[in-house]
Structures are given as C-alpha cells and as structure tokens.
Image (cartoon, grey):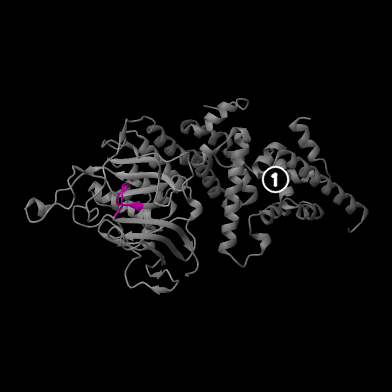
Amino acid sequence: MTERSERDEILDFPGADQLVAAGAVAPPPADRIAAAVDLVTPRTEREAEGTTTTPLIVLGRPGTGAEGPRTASGRSRFPRRRRLLLTAAAMAVPAAGAVAYPVLDVGGEPAATASAATRFLNEMAEVSGAASAPHGKYWMSHYLSKDGPPGRAPVTVTVYSDRSGKSWIRDPKGKVAVSGHNIADWRVGHRRLSWDGLNQLPTDPQKLKAHFPKNTADRFFQIMSLLEESPAGPRLRSALFQIVAKTPGVRMAPNVKDSRGRLGTVINLHRRAEPDPKAALGKSKPSVASPAYVDGPYYFIAPRTGRVVESTSDLHGKPTVRTTYLKVGWTDRIG
Amino acid sequence: MIEDPDDQEGRHRTVRDPVAFAALVERHATDLHGYFARRAPQAADDLHAELWLRAYAARRGYDPERGSVRAWLFGVARNVLSAHWRQRAADRPGLPRSAGGDDPWAAVDDRLVAASMAPQLRALLAQLPSTERELLLLVAWEQLSPTEAAAVVGIPAATARTRLHRARNRMRDGAARHMTGDPT
C-alpha cells in the first residue's frame, strides 16, 4: 500500500471532505516568506564566513598572581555583586572526554577572520537568540562562590532580583533578606543598568557595541559579565555573543571540565599584561607575577544553551576566584 | 542547493549546510506558515519566524534516519506551537484548560466553526484523544504521510498507523450512530 492510498483510506469517513476543506488557508504574502529567508540569511552568512580554520595553539600558562585578575584600572574582572545562572538540565552535553586545553585562537586578527572560536561564538549567538523569552517576576541565580585565599570553602548563594533592581539574598540556611547592596545592576559602559534598563539596549550588535567601552578588554569583561549573570533576553544575549565573536584575542577550548565535572567550552581573552602604573614608578611590585600575557578569567559555556556555567581565575591549580552556577532562571516567587 | 527528496545524504547535507539552509526556508515556508495559520492564526507570523530561528539553531540535531526534512521541520513547528500555548496558559492562568495547555484544539475548533463544519463532526473530533486528532489533522491538513506524522508527534510509525485507523473508525462509528439516532 502506498502512502497516498493510505491517506485516502484514513480519510475514508463521513465528513472527511469537510474536514479537509476547513483546513484551507491562503498562502502567506510573499513578504512573509522573504522575511523568513532574511531572518536566516545573516546567520548562514556569518557561519559561512567562519569556515576557514586557524592553527591550533596550546594554552599552557596559568592565569594570574595571588590577588586575582585585575583590569588596567584595578577593577576586578570578576563580577562581585551578583552571579547568575543555569538549570542543572541546561548543562553541557556530555562528550567523549575532557581534553587538556587545546585552544583555537581568533588570532588577534580583525573580526572577519574565520576561526573555530568565531564559529563557536556565532553558534552561541544562534542558540541564545532561539531561547525562550523571559518570563517570571524575579531573576534568580543559585551558585557556589569561591572568593578568597586557597583553603577557604566556597559558599552557596541564591540571589533574586526584580525588574526595578530590588534584590533579595537567600542564605545557606534558607533565610531570605532584602539585599543591603545594590546587586541588581549591570555595568554597561559608564552606566549601571537594572533589568528594565537592559531591556532598553539595542539588539543590533553594531549599535549595542557603541554602549560599551572602546577598550577591547574592558568591553569583553563587561559583556561576559552580562552573559554570565544578567537576565538579558535572548536577542540581547545573541547580540552580545556576536560582539564577542568579533573581538580579537578571544580563544576557546572545547570539552573542558569545570569544577563540577561538567563538560563545556572555555573561552578567554588572550592579551598582553597591562603595565602597573605604580610598578612602573617603582612604588610597588607588579600585581601580575611575570608574564608577558594574562589569560584569565576563563568562562565555561554550555554549548547547548549558550549559558556560562562557571567562571574561574585559573584553569590550573587552585583559583582565587571562582563562581559555579547551579541553577538560574526566572521565577515567580522568592524562597 | 535544492534537496533531492530521494537522496538521504543530500537532505542531511542541506539541513546542516548553512548556505543551503535558505533553500529549505523557501521550499517549506508556505506549508509551515499554513500549519501555524490553522492553529494559531493571530500569532502565525511570529511563530513562523520563531520556527526558522529554532530550526536553524537545531539543524545539527537533524537525523535523516528518523525521517524526512519536512517531518523534522513540522516537528520543530509543533514544539514552537506547544511552547506558545503553554506560555499563553501561563500568562492567563484563568484560561480554561481547553483553551490553554499545549493542545491547539480550541483554535482548531474555531476554524471548523468558521468553515461551517457540521456540529456532530466537530463533536466527534473533540472526543478523539488529542494525539489521534493531531495525527489526523497532520494527514488531512498538512498532507503528511502517516510515517511523517509519526515523526512529528514522536511515536513509531506503526503506532501512528494504528491510531489513525482507530480515529477513522471512531469517526465512522460516530457518524453512523448519529444517522441512526443512537445517543451513545
């Protein structure tokens, strides 16, 4: 029996013709089809751009000095005020096995340079853009925070924030208190934005980029902070990833385990160490141990969701700063 | 590149190839837009756009061993539609179950009313288990084969055939009861 005759046989009941006729709809206007093609075309073009590979470079240098990574201005690259993210179900898809940090590099070349890192980040832009739109009264993140000298145990923190910026913290014993700190804001350029403020940002990558610092490293760390811990919606996250994809010096390493043993892809910004002004004047020792390059922090990204599941100051040894996200998302209640 | 429907490897390449993907959009967009127009007419354009974004993002997950590209795309469309109805139910918690959840029956029934379909036929369709009804509509409206409809719903083809024939028999028996005046 062919499929066609099967169809006839299935629709062999009184009223089947009426049923089939009731399903008739006019074809969509041509501009609807064109719009669908236009929606996909930029993504296909971006991906097609990233088909050329660059050589593998082995990343072997530990990250930072004892005080943890700092920007030129001395600000910590790690967000201190709040952390975000991830449901357990949204973790990286298990792969065959972790590897020891083979890194593909954008190569410090201009944006259009094709590389595996660019392709990966553009894919994360796609994945993020296709995620569900935000819903719920509060943004919640439940995470393990390690921030201090080796030996100090990480603490479990749960933070809630509403759209206006009001925040609540639940301590490990389950007690919830209104936060005494302004933790529900996110730095974008010189401004600090609430959840509502983030929603006002443009989602065109070029226009969005203009809101961030011109300095590559400062821009990268602000964007990664948003991707890591903010309730940015799917389109904004997609645009943020697209900016990162065009950032020279971004490296990636696939199939790396985070501190919980979850496999993800690590990205970081490979850059020259910034001269310490005080050290240059002979008033203090350099804050960074020696190195010609500073590579941390490292961000573990779950390829299936585009979410940052962990950030750490050091892939090797004992990091001084590490945030491990256990659960993140929108919720309608606190507690 | 236009896919060759008889070339499984070609289908696989087309879905995974970013450049060739646009051809898929042109080829299937009308049918998929119709799927949404029949089940969520007010949101059809948005859902249609959402479908292609999701399909593109998920294209590497397409497995030609599990069915045609067309069935895979309708499967993605079904997921988009289900999410839409669930979200609608979440946004409007007072909505009766029949108008929310992820079963688009209420919208489908509106269409049947608008098409002046006989009330007894609507009642018979309403009484079908939701999966049987969905399979039937995929065959009747989207012109999917039973095998494709099975892939969309995520059940084995043999199971889909059993359910489709059961649905047909229910419709036949119900119509016969109506004609004889039997209220059971």
> Where is B86 relative to A248, above or below?
below
Q: Is residue A318 magenta?
A: yes
Residue B152 visible in the current orientation? yes
What amino acid type should be assigned to the residue bearing mark 1?
Answer: Gly
Residue at 87% from the left image edge and 49% from the top image edge: B173
For the residue pair A223 and A7, the one nearer the viewer reads as: A223
Q: Quadrant of residue A188?
A: bottom left
- Please provide percent x and percent y for residue B132: 74, 48
Residue drawn at the location 32% of the way across and 70% of the way down: A181
User: Is A222 drawn above or below residue A295 in the view shown?
Assistant: below
Nearer-the-camera pick, A301 or B13: A301
Give the magenta range: A311-319
x and y, in percent, of residue B183 in the image? 89, 59
Residue at the spot of label 1: A23
Q: Majority secondary structure of the magenta segment?
A: loop
Q: Secondary structure at mark 1?
A: loop
Does A86 sit above or below residue B162?
Answer: below
Position of residue A295 in the picture relative to residue A184 (left or right) = left
Residue at 49% across, 42% down: B57
Q: Residues within 10 Å of mark 1 (few under 14, many from 20)?
A: many
Residue A18 at x, y percent in the picture: 77, 45
Image spot of residue B101 (x, y percent) = 63, 58
- In the depicted view, which residue is nearer to us: A224 or B36? A224
Marks counted in the figure total 1
Residue located at (59% from left, 45% from top): B77
Which residue reaches farthest front?
A151
Q: Is residue A27 visible?
A: no
- Quick one: quadrant of the C terminus of chain B? bottom right
Closest to the observer, A238 or A117: A117
Q: Is residue A151 magenta?
A: no
